[in-house]
Amino acid sequence: MRGAVLVAIAATIGNLLQGWDNATIAGAIVYITEDFDLGSSLEGLVVAMSLIGATAITTCSGVISDSIGRKPMLIASSLLYFVSGLVMVWSPNVYVLCIARLLDGFGIGLAVTLVPLYISETAPADIRGSLNTLPQFLGSGGMFLSYCMVFGMSLLNSPNWRLMLGVLSIPSIFYFALTVFYLPESPRWLVSKGRMLEAKRVLQQLRGTEDVSGEMALLVEGLGIGGETSIEEYIIGPADGLADDQEPADKDKIRLYGPEEGLSWVARPVTGQGSLISLVSRQGSLVNQGVPLMDPLVTLFGSVHEKFPETASTRSMLFPNFGSMFSTADPRVKTEQWDEESLQREGEGYASDAAGGDSDDNLHSPLISRQATSLEKDLVPPASHGSVLSMRRHSSLMQGTGETVGSTGIGGGWQLAWQWSEKEGGDGKKEGGFKRVYLHQEGGPGSRHGSLLSLPGGDVPAEGEFIQAAALVSQPALYSKELIDQHPVGPAMVHPSETASKGPIWAALLEPGVKHALFVGIGIQLLQQFSGINGVLYYTPQILEEAGVEVLLENLGLSTTSSSFLISAFTTLLMLPCIAIAIKLMDIAGRRTLLLTTIPVLVVSLVILIIANLVTLGSVLHAALSTICVIIYFCCFVMAYGPIPNILCSEIFPTRVRGLCIAICAMVYWIGDIIVTYSLPVLLDSIGLAGVFGIYAVVCVISFIFIFLKVPETKGMPLEVITEFFAVGARQVAAAKSE
């Protein structure tokens, strides 16, 4: 996964520049205020001007990024950083400085909004959380470097604040070069626009493998929004004993097809109450929750992680013995590359709309496999042709031990499959159709080998290995009745561009799953801002000065201002190992666990700060307590509450409206940031540090309650599966309320 990691690091340079700017303005505002003789209101405006710019650009960034792509927006961000730095160097008066800060805010807004989105759309599910913590790491790294620069310049006789701010232009040139020449476009965005061949090549580059058929199929399935989804549980066994043209003898058994030719399984629905079915009845209404006001979706997500080993977040363990257990292809057969012309060369009767070499039009075939000719004959089920989706004729399968990764898994222990079903229509003719199935092994690897007594109802094959799996079953993106009516030859002839959005689908915001996700995203972004991090961040030097921090460093002969800059640099340095720990834990412990663990520490540190400012203490003790609490607050914040809201917002929305929804959440984020930043100097003058920290502590308590009740765990889950869960959970909540 080196390709995905390097791309994530390159994209995150935009966040390093944001951190650099945050720390630089925190130091430079001291000298700007003296130079221009600013009052507290105008001082707050200079600082908040970049936030106003970020808010303004965010209102349209999502719509534009969904239209023209993620990469052009990151290029625009780097250019805005560069231009704003040059203007800040010039700044003859406060008005020009405000304009420069506005341009800087445009660049910040694009980077902060789109980098997490870009990383989520390019990263594998198993390490998506870790890679999306990199923006926090590089942002804090940029702050540390900037504070070191500001501290060094504060030791000069006449510190130059214009030079402090203008240095931003230098690293922005490097960022521009990376965005133009190195970063690829998001493969999910490319798929949403029907540019399949480009998406395939980008995925091959990011994953370091030629075989990306399973993930390509997953990305195509992500185009669907709002399909009816049900939660089912299966006992799954090998279909090796059945010929391709045979159906299971037991009428209760169904046949599932994987994304490789020759790969299929026999599945039997669990008759009893499985682990997920026990939470959601087969009628779709919710079972009573044990915790009052607890969002059932939280419990539903949690049940998946509880039933799956923790190591699933670092490597796929769904069907670890897949190769020997379910593959009908000989694993010793040399892997044969699939390419867009293979169907014509092999003479299997498949006629593409566009003959010739590589093209998007020629990529119909791998998305829905070689059943095109059979579908033309009264929609006969595609058993005779092996599988539903195929990009490769023979692939080795994931063994869970670092062996070659095949296309069967889609990350985080999830598997994509399709089910063919037939029913008799009103005219007596049989009608067939596919269902999309997301499978997830339950109970850990031990459930692969068990007795009939170990599973509900004893509904397992009498011989051979079996797996108990939960399943999200819904309509596939490329196989709907409407599309079949338009294309009688079946879904093999439907190009994804025909199902892709030509622009933002505003109506999709009214889908229950999207509305539910927006509630979670907006809520956590707003609460994060009012927990006070950016207010404390921008004004750390002033806060430490008021706390009397110069007492701690008076023996060094430093001024009060230089002392506060030095401690600020030391504080940001301590953040880096804390964020490194978060990177390690983000896909192991999970987002929700990290939040619920660190927020109480934030509350305690704020309460101690309040006490230190209300109770009369010695100057040294007061300064020491204040400094320690500020450091603890920062370090715990950047471990969880700093990066996780952006991570969650980049994960919980469907592909076709992801940019639009993230822009809405980001706009809420920036509005909250403006309010907090602009009001902090006024609050410090009116209610003092103790009152400000008291407000922040109350918001942190509210945040803990909100996260505990409403925010689900998304670690290791493919983005498309997360949005399916939100859709089914929201509908079940609505059904429960209507009963």
Image (spheres, helix red, strand yellow):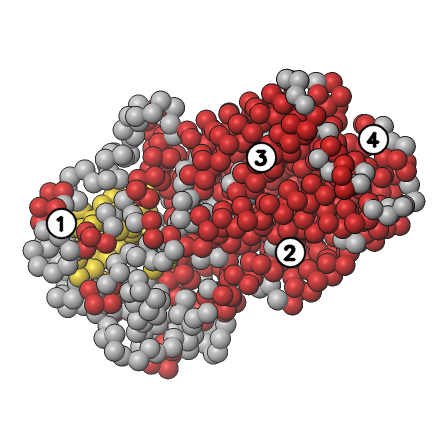
Whether residue 454 is situated above or below residue 127 in the rendered picture = above
Given residues 464 and 530, the one toward you in this image is 530
**Residue appearing at x 15%, y 55% in the figure:** 449
**Amino acid type at image mark 2:** Ile
**Amino acid type at image mark 4:** Leu
Q: What is the CA distance from the residue labelled 2 to the residue labelled 3?
A: 25 Å
Mark 4 lies on residue:
42
Residues marked 2 and 4 touching at CB (< 8 Å): no
Question: Which circle, 1 or 2, is nearer the viewer?
Answer: 2
Choose the circle earlier in sequence order: 1 or 2: 2
Task: Specify the farthest residue to the right.
Answer: 92
Residue 392 at x, y = what percent?
35, 72
**Amino acid type at image mark 3:** Tyr
Q: For the residue labelled by badge 2, is the local secondary structure a helix, a strand or a loop?
A: helix
Mark 1 lies on residue:
252
Given residues 446 and 397, the one toward you in this image is 446
Mark 2 lies on residue:
13
Question: Which circle, 1 or 4, is nearer the viewer?
Answer: 4
